[in-house]
Image (cartoon, rainbow, N blue to C red):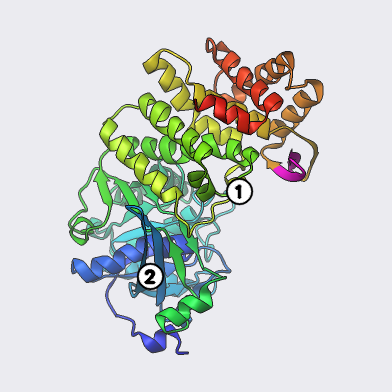
Amino acid sequence: MKKINEAVSPVTRPEKIMQYGEGGFLRAFVDWMIDILNEKSGFNGNVVIVQPLERGMGDVLNSQEGLYTTVLRGVQKGQTTEEIRTIRSVSRCINPYSAHEEYMRCAENPDLRFVISNTTEAGIAYSPDDKPEDKPQKSYPGKVTAFLYRRFTHFAGDTAKALVFIPCELIDKNGDKLKEIVLRYATEWNLGDDFLKWLAACDFCNSLVDRIVTGYPKDEAAALCEKIGCEDQLLDTAEIFHLWVIETKRDYSEELPFGKAGLNVIWTDDMSFYRTRKVRILNGAHTSSVLAAFQYGLNTVEECTKDKLVHAFMHKVIFDEIIPSMNGSTEELTQYANDVLERFANPYIKHLLLSISLNSVSKFKTRVLPSITGYIAKQGKIPPALSFSLAALFSFYKGKDFASGSLTGRRGTETYAITDDEPVLKEFEALYAAHDAATEAGAAAVVQGVLKKADWWGEDLTAIKGFAEAVSGALLLIQSKGMKAALEEVTK
């Protein structure tokens, strides 16, 4: 079988975009979009990728001349759909650890305009060890600062050569955070006032990305290569749904004409609605339902959508409590929620409930608690399904024998790992060791002990009238009657 670069020819174009990160997400999201831009809008630009870590997939990507295949699969209007595309928007991948000068020469490219990144949530961070003479700096913001100083110097401070950054890291205000650290380095490294003024011409956008990318399909790779007719070591699978919200005060919609190419990209000067919508509906639906679903006996998100009882609970949580807790167009929120449930039903994505369960306390605070407090503020009563979801979290965290960062819980005859911060796990272990949650007094004690932890939740949740009673009642029901009976009760 031919290799992909023997079956397909790469396309040489100006390198208008630099991308930090060669992983599956960016290749099936950003580079996939740029490939469509080249095809449908006349963008005529390629992506040069920078490998952020010393070890990565750059050599493989270069051996395929930047070519690879995306396989998008999902459910649309009740029908399974598959879209296969050969991506020809990547020109090359540079490893700045082994080819530092080649990387820095990219700063002298007059065609370069945009910088994209996905260096994980921990990537946009300050490192006191970074120095301007390092080749390269360890941190992503350190690399960026040195790169920008090279560009500033080469183009003699020409603000027309300033760059636009669109980070994709999953942290709030990612662009603002990156800019803050770059400015800190520029100041600490004494790079001069003129450079600081030039940096003001660079734009650091905040962005929100939304697509589930499942990456290289190890179990299906041979069959998919047979289907596309060539060998591809970088096959990249993902769902069909995609959304990119980019917050900026400047208009780049003509420079990156995603709309003309039919792509779901929203340029806005305030992305707070879109972030809130995603966190509270998509992420919130996960966090509020999967712990109950796991204890009920399910293992994947897809199974949740197929089980009548769990699906009814998810539907109640989303449409009866989360959406009524939010501001904004009910019609738009409802459409987004329907899209989310269709995405959850994707048979090609095996999203394990135990994977979603990691660090559920902090996730609940961010993703679900605002819906609870919002519902109380707007409806004047305690939301029963969301209160039940917190009780299901408490029940899931019933474990013992803390070791190696986790407790051991039991589901029937099986054991499972409960993974969270050590103080959280030890508090749950102590509470359950002291109290029997299958009794009214024991359930109340466990719930009171956890809800009063203001350092966990940002406030003392026992101060919310009637909330502790609702949660402890649900926990007692789960512990005494079992999850199936409890779910039947809450979904009546």
| Nearest the eye: 339 or 308 | 308
Report which quarter residue 268 is drawn in.
Answer: top left
Give the percent coordinates (x, y) of residue 1.
Answer: 47, 90
Amino acid type indicated by mark 1:
Asn
Give the percent coordinates (x, y) of residue 223.
Answer: 50, 77
| Nearest the eye: 98 or 195 | 98
**Label drawn at residue 299:** 1
| Nearest the eye: 460 or 284 | 284
| Residue at the image position 35 percent from the left and 46 percent from the top | 339
Is residue 179 at least partly visible in the picture?
Answer: no
- Label 1 secondary element: loop
Give the percent coordinates (x, y) of residue 453.
Answer: 63, 21
| Up/down of 72 relative to 89, above or below | above
| Residue at the image position 38 percent from the left and 50 percent from the top | 209
Residue under pointer 2? 48
Give the percent coordinates (x, y) of residue 379.
Answer: 38, 16
| Residue at the image position 27 percent from the left and 37 percent from the top | 332
- C-alpha gap between disc 2 and disc 1: 39 Å
**Label drawn at residue 83:** none
Q: Which residues are magenta?
A: 405-417
**The magenta stretch spans residue 406:** yes
Mark 2 near mark 1, Cβ–Cβ under 8 Å?
A: no
| Nearest the eye: 73 or 189 | 73
Amino acid type indicated by mark 2:
Val
| Up/down of 467 relative to 257, above or below | above
Is residue 304 at least partly visible in the picture?
Answer: yes
